[in-house]
Image (cartoon, rainbow, N blue to C red):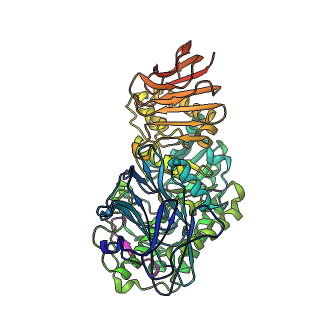
Amino acid sequence: MANLADPRRLWADGKAIDVHGVAVTRLTAGPAPTTLAAAGQGVIEVLGVESETTLVRLDVPLDGAVGFWHPAAGWDRHLTADWMATGLRTVGLVDSAPLGCLYDDAGRAVLAFASDRLVHTTRLRFGVGERAGRFGVWLAMDLGPGELCRIRIAPPGGAVAETVRSLVRRQSGTAVLPVPEAGRVPAYSTWYSYHQEVSATAVEAEAELAAELGCGLLILDDGWQRGAYGGGYAGCGDWEPDPEKFPDFGAHVETVHGLGLKYLAWIAPLLLGDDSAARDRLAAFAPHARPEWRCHVLDPRHEEVRRFVVDTCVRLVDRYGLDGLKIDFLDAAMVYAEDSTRREEGTRSGGGVAPAEGVRPENGAGREDRANLEDHANPEDRGRPEDGGDVGESMRVMLTELRDGLMAVRGPELMIELRQPYTGPGMLEFGNLLRAGDCPADAAGNRVRTLDLSVAGRESAVHSDMLMWDPQASPQVAARQLLSVLHAVPQISVPLAQLPAAQRAMAGFWLAFWREHRDVLTRGALDAGRPDGLHPVVIARDATRAVVVHHVSDHAATLDPTRFAEIAVVNNTGAERVLLDLTHPAAVRLDVRDACGTPVRSETACLDPGPRWLAVPPSGLCLIRPA
């Protein structure tokens, strides 16, 4: 794989063409990029040559650019320099996607691109060239002789969200796993409520309360399986229910079904625990050690691993009547892609791979922290998998067999939850519930992550990270966790039996509001502003309704009050008012409720055009309808 850490190579001259004002340059041997015949839509083709990594640069003048968005951007949406480690990533099927958008201060695309290499590993670099005065994106790809890569360049000037969504639609095509109704209803997760201390009795009691609140899906997280103790993954690999916690797992699932909830169970099929019975049998296929997790990572390039994963998951769903799986740590496979890159490049300077998902805090490190991901295996013991190949391609083969096997058992009602970063366009055919990466009690982080997922597409069900809050907090404060993700499917994860009455009233009110407005919130058009602004106001709209959520009280929401039969204004702040900027006058009726749904006032008003403050209680709601 080409060494993207060599600054002398990044801005070298090469064979170039211009597409929508973007200079597309091949920096390695081979024919110049060409425009796809008769496409007329900014599609270029890059042809692979013998034994040579293909390195392509896309670059534009800086002009008014202020930020760069990509699927794994997280908080880093600013303009990084081309020599900084924050602009270096390895992407593939189970880690982000070869997709990005440079934008200006009006939130318009300046350079937006998407490569069709969704499966195979691509090394990306991006950043400002200090001497060139330009912004560049570099893609390093191992194209075989005669192999084509197509890169689509979007015309500049479109809104970031619309531009990215258009690129993703063309990337993923029509291969999207359908979402059953149960995937689009509020869910209850056991993770932040119980962590690994789950049991049939506790889960069934919580399931009953969750159903009363309006949840339709229960997700049993880590802890149900034999050997799940001490916060680590030492028992992973056997995937049998713990007989002390769940004496009859099948009967337990039936009990939860009887309450009206569908049931998913957590599994991390690529983790091989140090204490598992499967360890001796599969150790040869898991050379990469994670001592802080007390496990190794299975290498999916081995047929034996792929067969083990598929058989294990299908058996679990079939034997216990599950409605699907929450599949975790698929991105762990990328250590083998990174190992391959290291062997070809040697040790890189400047930081290597950007942070991605790691492990839960209780397990010794943050799930958001793979910056310190190290290969603890002995290189002499690692070897090359006998069936070799690209990690992304091996994962594609495994996930195809897994999906087909689960569909044969569960049919179109199957649900598979995937989480960031393995939620890119190439994964939409393998999972239908796309969840934000772990961000416990981080309302802003949950908002940003779910909006990143929503930008990429609305066909799948975008789920929040599990929602937790302080049971001693006021209902107004607790509500902010839920209100921050109204545009996604909420996953509640607090001990419901321990909630104070006011918090339970709050959760019931807002979940009822969410169900009533679900279609506009999760399928309507979204306007969330510039990515680097972290979305202070989010507006979801369809033909007749709009939901406006203020995450910052003094940031105006621009609206035409005459266009909608109902505008729901949500105040997700601690202030007593929010700011609207109305484009037309309107005579309206205002119905205001507090965080628990208690009516505050109802009145008629004549709203003049222009900026105006609207009194709404903290974590409260104002419904605006024609008078």
Q: Is residue 530 magenta?
A: no
Q: Is residue 439 visible?
A: yes
Please identify the quadrant where the C terminus is shown.
top right
Q: Is residue 424 above or below residue 160?
A: below
- Residue 291 within the segment the image draws in magenta: yes
Q: Residue at x 62, y 62 (%)?
A: 40
- Magenta part of the chain: 284-293
As rendered, which of 302 and 606 lies closer to the eye? Answer: 606
Pick the front one: 68 or 105: 105
Q: Is residue 456 visible?
A: no
State the image coordinates of residue 147 (x, y, percent, origin top left). Answer: 57, 80
Q: Height in image: 562 above or below 343?
A: above
Front residue of 295/356: it is: 356
Residue 475, given in percent of the width and then of the height, sits at 43, 28
Residue in view at x 53 percent, y 82 percent: 144
Q: Position of residue 132 (x, y in %)?
A: 33, 63
